[in-house]
Each structure stands twice: as C-alpha cells, then as structure tokens.
Amino acid sequence: MIERKLSRRLRRAAVLVACFSVAFLICGGLFAAYLHNSHSQLLEDQVILETEEYKTRILKQLQADFQTLATLSVFIQRDTDWELLAERLNRTQEYNSFVNIVYYNQDGQGIISGQDGNVVIGAGLAELSEDGKQSIEKALAGEPSVSRLFESVISNRRIFVYSVPVYDGDEVIGALSASDHIEIFSDIFSGNTVLGGGGYIHMIDSDGNFLVRSSKTVVQEDLSTIYDGPYLSQDSKDDVREAMQNQQRIFSTFSYEGKTYPFLLEPMGFNGWYLFCVNTGEGLYAESNSSILVAQVMFTAIVIFIILLMLYGYRLLRNYNKDLLVLAYYDTLTGAENMSRFRQKLTEALTESGGSVTTFCIRQFPFLTEIFGKEKSNQLLCQMKEMIGRHIQKGEFFSRDTEDRFYLFLKETDPDTIRKRLDALIKEIEAYPLSGRTDYRLAVYCGVTLSSGGNGARAEMENMLTRVQFALDKAKEGHSSTIWFFDAELHKQEELENYIESHMHHALQDGEFLLFLQPKIHLTDGALAGAEALVRWQTGSGRMVFPNQFIPLFEQNGFCVKLDLYMVEQACRQIRSWMDRGIEPVPISVNQSKLLFFEGDYVQKLTHLLEVYRIPAHFIILEILEGLALENVDELSAKITQLQAKGFRISLDDFGSGYSSLNTLGKLQIDEVKLDKEFLMNAADQKQMRVRLIMEEIVRMAGRLGISTVAEGVETPEDEQLIRAIGCNVGQGYLYSKPISADDFDRIYMQERFKRGSSR
Ligand code: C2E
Ligand code: MG
Ligand code: MG
C-alpha cells in the first residue's frame, strides 16, 4: 500500500521534473531562437536600410551627373559654335570630376573635353570604345543611358559612361556624355560606416564582377568576381545567379576561414549592377550580438541550473522514498521484510494462487537472550534470516515480525512437501552454534496453515495469520521441535473455550444462563413426575450454547460450582413461584458436578437456598454422575446421607454409561437411578437382547432396593413400550418433550396443576 503510494508519488515527481525540464528546454530553445531570429531580422533590416542608403547616395551622384549634363544640353543648339561648345564643356569639366565630357551630333561628329583641359574638336564616334559608343548612340536615339564598365581607350582606365540626349525643340540633335572612373564611388565605399563598422560594401555588375571593391574586405585574396574561390557554396552561387538574373534582392552567406558571413545583394536599378554588402559580425552590432549571446548563454545556464536543481530534488525525493520504504517495509535488525510487507505480499500471492503460511519461533528465546546476551541472540536472528532466505524459491517470501517470530510463505499446499522443506530448514537452524562454550541445542516451533481458498484474498490473509498463530500455540505445547498444522475443528473448539472462559462470569451476572426444563413422565399413568433442570446459555449476541459445550470446561476450571448452585437457586425460585401461584409443584432434578458435591459447605449452601425460598427439600432432586461413586464411595455415601437427612433426594445420572456396576446401587443410599440414554439407543436394535437384559436387571435390582428408575432418551413409542415392559417407573425424553424454557414448561404442564392445586 505504502509502496504503491510512494511509487505513485515518485512517478508523479518524475513526470513533473521531466515536464518542467522539457518545458524549460522548449522555452529556452524558443527564447534562443527568438533572440537569434529577431537579431538576424534586425541585422537584415539594418543591412537593407544601410545598403539602400548607399544605393540612394550612388543614385544621387549619378543623378547629379545626369543633371549636370542635362543643364549643359540646354545651351547646345543646332547652330552652336563648336569652339564655344568646347569651351563650355571645358568649363563644366573644371567643376566636375569627369574623366571626359563629350558631345556628338547626329552625324557622329563630336567634341571631347579631357580632364587636363585637352579638347578635341571634330572627333569621330567611331574612335570611341564600343561601350562608350553604345551609350552615346542610345542618347542620340533619345534615351539617357549608363554604360557598362569598360577600359577607356583614351585614359586606359576602367570607366563608365552616361549619356543624355540634346534636344532642339523636339528633335534630338546630339548627345552629351560624360565618363567617370568607377572609383568615384570608392569614397562612398571606403567609409567604415556600414553596420557600425561591421559591414563592407562592394559594387558588382550583373556577372558578379567587382566594379568597386571596398578597401576593407573579408576575403583578403585578390578576386575579380564574387564567384571566385571556394567561398560561395554551389547552392549559394545558384541562388545568387538566379536572383541577379531577375534583379531581385537576395540574402545569402559565404564562408571564409571557417567562419560564415551573411551578405546582401541589393540591385542598383541600372545596368544590372548590384551592391554587395557583407556583414562581418564585428563593429557596433558585434556588441549587441555578443550581448545576445551572453543572454542566450545565461538563459541556457539558468535552464540547466533549474533542471539540475529539479533533478537533485527528484533524487532527494527518491532517496527519501527509499528510506521511507525501508522504514515501512524492512526490519532494521535483520534486514528482512517486516509484517506490513508480508501481509501485502501475502494478499497479492493469495490473489494469484494458494500456498501455505508458516510461523517460526525459537524455544525459550527470551531465556536465550538472557543467558547468552543480546548480541548473540541478535546474531542468531540475522542468521535465521539468511537461512530462511536460502530455503525459499521463486514467488515465495518471508518476514520477521518481532523478537524471534518469522513468517514464511511457501507456494506449496501439500502437507508432506511442506513438512519436508520445513524439516530441512529447521535442521539448519537448530544446528546453529549459539555459543562455542556450551552445546546448547536450539529448538524451533513451527505453526503451519494452508490457504483454504474462497473468501477474498484480504480476508483469507487475515484468517491465515490467525490460524497460523493458533497452530504455533499448539506446536509450543509440544516439547521438542514441532511442526503443527492448523486443525480447523480443534480451533473452533478452542475459540469457543476462550470465549466461554472470558465471558462466563459476566454471563452469570447478566443472567445469560437460563433454566430449561424437561418433563419426567410416570409410565404407569402418563402423569408428570417432575422435571430436569438443564442449563442453556443464551449469549449476548442471542446465540444458544448447549451444556455439553461448556459443562466439561466448567468442570475443569471450577466454574461449575457457581453455575450448579445458581441452577439450584433457579429451580428453587421456580418452585417458589409455583407455590406462590397456588400451583402444586413437581420436584425438579438439578445436575450437580463432582466439585460442588465435595465442597465443604455444600450442604449448608443448599439448605440456605431452601430457607431463602422457603421450599421443602423433597422438591429438589440432586443428580450426580455415577463416576462420583468410583473414587470415594464412603465419603460420597456420607454426603448422600447428610443431604437425605435434610430432605433432598439423590438421583444417579447416566447409569450404565461408564464403569457402573450394580454394586454401586447397593452401596449408595440413592433415591433414583437414571438409565443412560445409550441403553435405549442400543436396545432399539432387536439383536441387542443383552442390552435389554441388562436394563431389566438394573430395574429389577433397583426396585428391590426401593430405588425409583428413570429411563433417559425415550424417543419413540417403542422405547416407551420397552421401558414400561421391563418395569421402569419414569420416562424422560423427546417423545414427551425436549427441554423447554421454564415459561413454556409452566404454560404446557403446570397450568393444569394450578387447577388441581387450587381445587385442593
Ligand atoms: P443429562 O443430565 O444426562 O441430561 C440429559 C440430556 O439428554 C440433556 O442434554 C437432554 O437434552 C438430552 N435428552 C433428553 N431427552 C433426550 C432424548 O430423547 N434423546 C436424546 N438423544 N437426548 C435427550 P443437555 O441438556 O444437552 O445436557 C447435557 C448434559 O449436560 C446433561 O446430561 C448434564 O450432564 C449436563 N448438564 C446440563 N445442565 C447442567 C447443569 O446445570 N449442571 C451440570 N453440572 N450439568 C448440567
Ligand atoms: Mg441429568
Ligand atoms: Mg443423563
């Protein structure tokens, strides 16, 4: 029971700990993921924001340049003087940082103004490099454009060109074009301002070629495209290529020296150019990054700490439960299981199948402890535990109760097998040398009971433990090693005796002993000759107990003396009651036990009762058993004489049942003899002529001695016929009536006598 409760509690704690741990881990994971995500999101947003800012600045620069060209174009007309135009271009060049600024008309004739003030008038379009030419041609067709990056044939530097159409009215008359080194953006890119110094921005074209590479780079090698080297995985390359084809923004990563770097590719919106922004994880954001890391680490540490704490708590609870279990289920001296555990296991075992319970104890164990000391006796108990442990098989168990009491459950139900197994165990225990100095031999008592099935495991368990105790008590009554099996019949008797012994005094006080009367009938005329007082014990619970169940015990424990006198008093009271009511009394025979009969003041006690109830003594017949005559005939005879002198009559009960002899009749001055009911029982058998002869002889002899004869156990008319035939005077038996309560007797037999008594 306790075990189940504890393990349930433990299981609950384990589930709780596991749930909490999982919940904490999930929370921790979610929190870490949340931190990571929000940080990444924040970074991404920041990268986009800052990159777009750069993009805007670049576009603004381009726009400003376009604007310069557009403004300049306003001053150019069809008839503008080329010298004048060259000067204008030159002047414009002074305020801007263009590599060249050129003008071409629709005929492909143009002016080139260089940085150093060189002006070429009448330059042909064909002299320009292909990219520059294409840009100008687009402008001549009315579309402003920016070229790809290309190597200038003039400056031998990588430049790009942007061109605007020059209108005269609605007509495009020429194109103004300026070229710039891509490095103009380097200023923009060289600053360490992206992501608080933690990001580098490069510019690439649609093929991934670096147009402008920031002065600060993650990858230190000289690279011409972002695809160079092993830094971008194949997947990333594919994704990047696809995104760039569609001019989409893309986030991806590359690895360098074992570290992963996220980057953003932001389309510029012209020429397929892209801004390539790499997050190095350093700079300002590194701090927030590291504080997030610290938060994550701290949170993880807290979670681990809490889990450890809970595990520790769980361990403590488990150990505490274990201790509780040990306390609840184990005997501290021998380490054997205790009775609580045994009862529990026994109930479980009986639910499944039958078996037997044995209880042991050592003969005179307290004495052994006293003689050999506590330590030795404790050692013996520990050894007993070991020995029993060695003798049990799977599914069997044992326990120690208190002192030297051990209980053992064996799966066996066959008494012979049990006895054999117990013999082997007892032999081992008895061979244990308690002390080296003496050759004291131990003796073991064993009480055994078998399961009886039925009831219910719990009730059966309780019954078995009671029965085995009873069997052990019986075993102890022997003097050497004894194994005693419980005997149900014997037990019932003992149980009753215990009950009787412990209740008899109260029962007498409480009037539980009742006077029952059985009529005695004159065989000559069928008239009522008297009645025999027979005691009945009606216990508090209403159960009726018959005299053969308690009289033998009362004879042993002496209580008969009290009970018999009580019954005499009840008889006196009854006679008094008849007399008081004017009913002619009949004599009442009261059974007297040997003990009472030989009590010193027996006669006085009886006469005292007669006086108290004012009754003539001849109304009381004292029935004594013939066995009394065997011991001291003289003393008995003297007592009889004494009583007869007082007026009592004496009847010899159950004559013929024991060692009676006809001599007894001669020796004792008795008034009545009651033939034992055994006679009639045997006489019913026609072949038993001898019985009949003996009865006849007794009756004849009694008659001659002036002794009245009563036949007991008259059950049938044949019985009555027989006793009448042999000359018996009175009959008593079920044929006339069973013993009935005094009230019933009054009603059935005495009312009539009232009429007679009163008519006299
Ligand atoms: P008992 O004195 O020989 O009493 C006769 C017993 O035979 C009674 O049993 C009675 O019920 C029984 N009996 C009567 N008629 C018949 C019959 O036709 N057939 C059979 N088979 N039995 C019959 P009960 O009342 O159980 O008493 C048993 C014995 O207990 C008595 O035997 C007597 O020895 C003793 N006893 C009863 N009351 C007292 C008492 O107050 N004091 C003492 N000391 N002994 C008593
Ligand atoms: Mg009797
Ligand atoms: Mg009798």
Image: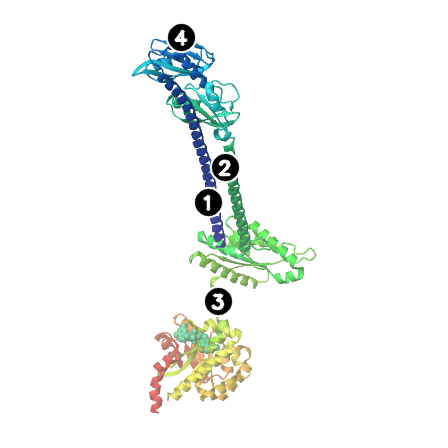
Observer able to see residue 569: yes
Amino acid type at image mark 4: Ala
Marks 1 and 4, how far apart in space? 84 Å
Q: Earlier in the sequence, mark 4 or mark 3?
A: 4
Q: Is mark 3 within 8 Å of ligand 1?
A: no
**Looking at the picture, how far across and down is residue 456, in whole percent?**
43, 57
Amino acid type at image mark 3: Glu
On screen, residue 611 above or below 550? below
> Which marked residue is nearer to the observer: mark 1 or mark 4?
4
> Which marked residue is nearer to the observer: mark 2 or mark 3?
2
Q: Which residue is mark 1?
A: 19
Q: Earlier in the sequence, mark 1 or mark 2?
A: 1
On the rendered structure, is 76 left or right of 364? left
Q: Which residue is mark 3?
A: 495
> Which marked residue is nearer to the observer: mark 4 or mark 2?
4
Give the label on residue 123, or none.
4
**Looking at the picture, how far across and down is residue 332, in whole percent?**
58, 55
Which element type, helix, strand or loop, lies under badge 3?
helix
> Which marked residue is nearer to the observer: mark 3 or mark 1?
1
Q: Earlier in the sequence, mark 2 or mark 3?
A: 2
Marks 3 and 1, how far apart in space? 58 Å
Observer able to see residue 419: no
**Looking at the picture, how far across and down is residue 730, in whole percent?**
40, 81
Q: What residue sits 43% from the left and 29% below the top?
A: 48
Q: Earlier in the sequence, mark 1 or mark 4?
A: 1
> Which marked residue is nearer to the observer: mark 4 or mark 3?
4
Q: Which residue is mark 2?
A: 292
Depth order, front residue of 63/281: 63
Which element type, helix, strand or loop, lies under badge 4?
strand
